[in-house]
Image (cartoon, rainbow, N blue to C red):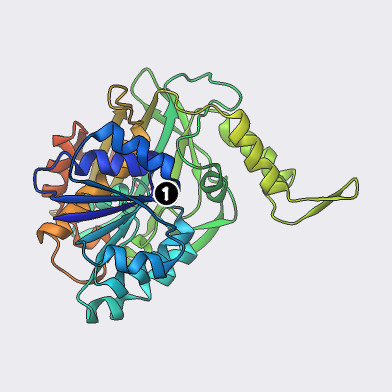
Amino acid sequence: MKFVVLGAGQMGYAVAYDLIRSPRVDKLLLADKDPARIVELVEKFEDKRIVPCELDAADSAQVVPIIQEYDIVISCLPYRMNYDLAKAALEAGTHFCDLGSDEQTLQKIMALDALAKEHQIAIVPNCGLAPGLVSILAAAAAAPMEELYEMRLRAGGLPIEPELPPMRYSLVFSAEGLIDEYCGDTIIIRHGKVLRVPVLEELEEIQFPEPFGKLEAFSTGGNVATLPDTYGNRVQLLDYKTIRYPGHCSQLRLLRDLGLFSSEPVELDSQTVVPRELTRTLIDAHLPRNEPDVVLVRVKVTGIKERKPWQIVWEGIDYMDQGAGLSAMARMTAFPASIIAQMIAKGDISETGVLKQEECVPVRLFLAEMASRGIRLSQREGEPEVPPKL
């Protein structure tokens, strides 16, 4: 099997780290426009199967001839590039998956379905943590249900140190992507109707085992992906919320309410300043990076099973692998994408077109692969402790 990893940042490193540990991987092209990043990773791996490649992935004329001899491409680049990269993969006749896209980019990728089927190519967007892993767990919990009431998806990456200044948070991916999650609105299903609600709202308390205890969760953008299409005619409530330490949401609301997430230019002392760009720059400068982290996941699905109310809960807690230099967020984002890409290359996922991971991923095999990487996702089920709140 021959793979291409586009992007040699934290996520690209984590995907390559996982792929290179498979004896079935014959060749791995690692591409980035920054040659220093490629050299750094090649030196880390010291594996003859890795082919370094300096590549500007924004130039499809460069991308297509390079990737066409490979089985599958995994994009670890900014999500705004994923639509053009998916088109380049189609032109090259190469399967494609990515770590996640915003709603607009996802819609454009989904529109490639007929063309992908015609070319017998599999495109699987949103293969990271959320969307991605949480969607697969939701589908696993929904499968045995005769009727569905609600699907509640919760996930978040946190620093191990709960009082880490200045926001009890550390950067585990780009500041640009982080701000995107905190802007605009997001899709939910309530009372069986698809609705849009503002992000940074719907605040709730959520409990995890010690040392975490009481945390908070609130709406963020782009995380339900294709689930409303898949389950919209079956479920009464579906939502996703991001988990953070208490108080984080109020800090974000303050930034939003002051206009610091706005892309509208502001005149300041005869200069034009874009508040969002300033905020991104300051977040990059002042929020800590590379702190030991943890990812928390809880997916709760309630419905009817064997003619009685039933609830299935998937839960996971994963910590940074300091020895390998892999954050928990990298593990929980990159490993699912690597697993799905390998499933496509091996034929475990044989459908073509633009595929939804909640429909195409063989769940038992996927969970076994995650467990083999030390990621334990536990399931519990029984009658709901309280009636569903619809």
Compared across the picture, whether 349 is left or right of 139 comes to: left
For mark 1, give the secondary structure.
strand
- Residue 113, percent across and down? 30, 76
Compared across the picture, whether 183 is left or right of 94 comes to: right
Q: Residue at x 49, y 66 (%)?
A: 104
- Residue 140, percent across and down? 20, 51
Q: Is residue 304 above or below residue 85?
A: above
Q: Amino acid at mark 1?
A: Tyr
Q: Is residue 298 visible?
A: no
Compared across the picture, whether 327 is left or right of 200 comes to: left
- Residue 286, percent across and down? 62, 29
Q: Residue at x 9, y 48 (%)?
A: 24
Compared across the picture, whether 262 is left or right of 287 comes to: right
Question: Which residue does the numbered mark 1 point to in the structure image?
Answer: 240
Closer to us: 74 or 314: 74
Image quadrant holding the N terminus, namely bottom left
Closer to us: 204 or 112: 112
Quarter occupied by residue 377: top left
Q: Is residue 248 visible?
A: yes
- Residue 166, percent across and down? 61, 24
Q: How many numbered marks have been drawn onto this rendered protein structure?
A: 1
Q: Residue at x 23, y 78 (%)?
A: 117
